[in-house]
Image (cartoon, rainbow, N blue to C red):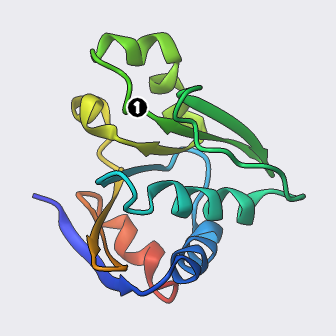
Amino acid sequence: MAQTHFTTTLQSEQAMTQLGAALAPVLTGGDCLALRGAVGAGKSVLSRSIILARLDAPEDVPSPTFTIVQTYDAEGFEIWHCDLYRLTHIDQIDELGLEDAMDHALCLIEWPEIMDALLPKRTLYVDLKTQGDARVLTLSSNDTAWERRLQGVL
């Protein structure tokens, strides 16, 4: 069972963006974030803010809803932003090269449920639930190293 590290209520999209910017500096290649929540819960907003905070220069960061994967070059590693909503079978993960990317890239995976069995032990789960206009965000992981890494950030 995952150990919860942090739960908070975010009152606005700006608060979600600020949280992503605060998380970004502690994330690096080989990290995997599994973003779970309903349509409109804020998965793409949080991912976009993390990506923009890690890039040297601002660029357009679209949701990978139709491309499935968008990649970005951060300093020292790649960022893979994935939206697995449209995948129908776990075998499609292999075609994307995502398993290999999880070894060296920062992987932000929206709708990760199809590949739960393939997610590394070190995965940080980001659960988002709507509560009126607000979002309740919970970070959890089976890897206790996240406890240390998240201290002072959140």
Which residue is at a point 28% across and 79% down the rendered structure image? 132
Residue 132 falls left or right of residue 69: left
Mark 1 element type: loop
Task: Identify the image quadrant of residue 24.
Answer: bottom right
Q: Is residue 31 above or below residue 67?
A: below
Q: Residue 153: percent from the left, percent from the top?
A: 52, 84
Residue 107 falls left or right of residue 84: right
Q: Residue 96: percent from the left, percent from the top?
A: 51, 17
Residue 1 falls left or right of residue 119: left
Which residue is at a point 65% across and 34% down the rendered structure image? 70
Q: Is residue 51 above or below residue 78?
A: below
Read off the residue under disc 1: 84
Q: Residue 133: percent from the left, percent from the top?
A: 36, 79
The single residue placed furthest to the left in the displayed view is 1
Task: Identify the image quadrant of residue 20.
Answer: bottom right
Which residue is at a point 59% across and 43% down the rendered structure image? 63
Q: Is residue 146 above or below residue 62?
A: below
Q: Amino acid type of disc 1?
A: Leu
Which residue is at a point 59% across and 81% down the rendered structure image? 14
Characterize the local packing of mark 1: few (<14), some (14-19) or many (20 or more) Cα atoms within 10 angstroms. Answer: many
The single residue placed furthest to the front in the displayed view is 132
Give the total of numbered labels. 1
Q: Residue 35: percent from the left, percent from the top?
A: 38, 53
